[in-house]
Amino acid sequence: MIPTDSPFHPDNSTGYQAWRAEKLANYPLCGEDLIVQVDDLKNLGNTEYQALWQRIAKTNMAIYASNLGETEDKDGARLLSAQFGLTHLDANWLADEDGISSLTPQDENASKRGEFIPYTHHRIRWHTDGYYNPAERRIFAMTLHCVREADEGGVNDLYDHELAYMALRDANPEYIRALMAADAMTIPARVGDTEAIGDERNIARADETGPALCVAEGHLHLRYTARTKSIAWKQDAATQAALKALEELLASHPKGSFSLKLQPGMGLICNNVLHTRSGFIDRPEHRRLLYRARYHDHLRNLRG
């Protein structure tokens, strides 16, 4: 239930307009504006911290750049995240034992991870992470740290989900109502690995029905994927119109979207913004590698 005084409540026009004006004021113009150079990920200096938070507060994301290069060390990204209140990792079944995923291409015939797009060379279309998770395991924030970049490709497009909300609401408030409906989208069940017994299926994850847009702890949250095989949208006219409007918005390279390629030692920290990844080429002896940490927390300013 969205509080009536929230700027994201579709009936709160006054609050929305005030929030909208503040949001758009001095909004960054390019991806480079998001980058903050840091000396020690594990212990940010106050100037570095405030520079990162300023970008997060405005755009729901920031990019840090360190001198770690191709060092394979997860602690830096994990401890940087903790400085912004991210401590509850989503230990999904494909993550490493420490709950952080090592995103690198896998042999599809030798590894179950190779069946999933993040572990391939293929492009990934617009989405937010963990859109298929149940309500009690929502992914509100994530960190993506680059260890090794691809020889070619592997570029990320980034788009603040609050800007997407704004564009849809300005176009037609009914789009917002449709996407906030409790049955706006359903993630079909994922069947497990063991063989079926009779008519029984081994369900690794049940059907998950819920809203695409919701508000949690005052923060706007979007669950979305441009894929069609792993999601079933409500088939009424209002939802389909909202979905089409969102698809067209994302395809238009909207103002406020950023495009950049993370270099070794760089990372994205965000409140689960919309993002993509282009297809890429690397070499067996130098595989692209990024660490991905997903969190059930929102980013917070702990030095405010």
Image: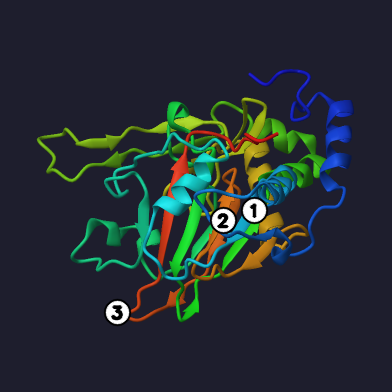
Residue 180 vs residue 83: left or right?
Answer: right
Compared with 295, 119 (above or below) is below
User: Can you tell which mark lies on residue 268?
Assistant: 2
In this view, the mark in front (2 or 3): 2
Measure the C-alpha gap from mark 1 to mark 3. Answer: 31 Å
Q: Secondary structure at mark 3?
A: loop
Q: Secondary structure at mark 1?
A: strand
The three-letter code of the residue at mark 3 reads Pro
Please state, as top left, top right, bottom left or bottom right, where the N terminus lies in the image: top right
**Disc 1 vs disc 3: Cβ atoms closer than 8 Å?**
no
In this view, the mark in front (1 or 3): 1
Residue 113 in the image: state x and y as whole percent.
28, 57
Any part of residue 15 in sight? yes
Residue indicated by mark 3: 284
Any part of residue 245 in sight? no
Residue 129 in the image: state x and y as whole percent.
49, 47
**Disc 2 vs disc 1: Cβ atoms closer than 8 Å?**
yes
The three-letter code of the residue at mark 1 reads Ala
- Dot 1 or dot 3, earlier in sequence: 1
Of residues 170 and 42, the one drawn nearer to the viewer in this rendering: 42
- Dot 2 or dot 1, earlier in sequence: 1
Residue indicated by mark 1: 62
Please state, as top left, top right, bottom left or bottom right, where the C terminus lies in the image: top right
**10 Å neighbourhood of mark 2: few (<14), some, or many (≥20)?**
many
User: Can you tell which mark lies on residue 269?
Assistant: none
